Image (spheres, rainbow, N blue to C red):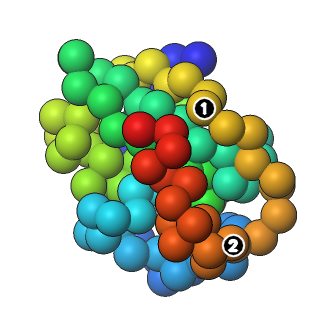
Amino acid sequence: MDGVASVYWEGHQTANGSAFHPNDSQHITIAHKTLPFGTVLRLEHNGRSVIAEVTDRGPFVRGREFDITPPAARALGIDGLGRIQATILHIGHGGYHRPDWYAEGHRSKYE
């Protein structure tokens, strides 16, 4: 799937109940309108890629498919808006925050 991504940094809690840390490069997250929480995506833009987990809902602006955190934007070389390609690596359980996700090493499993 592909679409326009915007960078977001406001908020204190995501829709799945986890804390929102917009500058934490260890927990790169993404917002999507319909993908289940916990879904892991490989995001690509201009030859760069990053792994991100769906933890929030949005964007709520016509024509945009994804909201990405500043660390994801930096990794992809996006400043503001950019068209990205997203590949699903793992379909999430759709539930609320799993604090053990990174502790269990799931992130490295998909990189």
Measuring 50% from the left and 39% from the top, which residue is drawn there? 110
Residue 89 location, x and y as percent? 60, 32
Q: Residue 81, image x and y in percent?
A: 30, 34
Residue 78, percent from left and from top: 21, 36
Which residue is at 51% across, 18% downward? 2
In this orientation, which residue lies closer to the viewer: 72 or 92? 92
Q: Nearer the viewer, mark 2 or mark 1?
A: 1
**On screen, residue 58 above or below 64:** below
Q: Which mark is residue 108?
A: none
Left/right placement of residue 92 relative to residue 58 reads right
* Residue in the picture at 34% in, 38% down: 50
Residue at mark 2: 97
Task: Classify 44 as above or below 20.
Answer: above
Quadrant location of the C terminus in the rendered image:
top left
Amino acid of disc 1: Leu
What SS does tag 1 mark?
Answer: strand
In the figure, residue 87 lies in which quadrant?
top right
Instruction: Give the Cα separation between the discs numbered 2 and 1.
Output: 18 Å
Tag shown at residue 89: 1
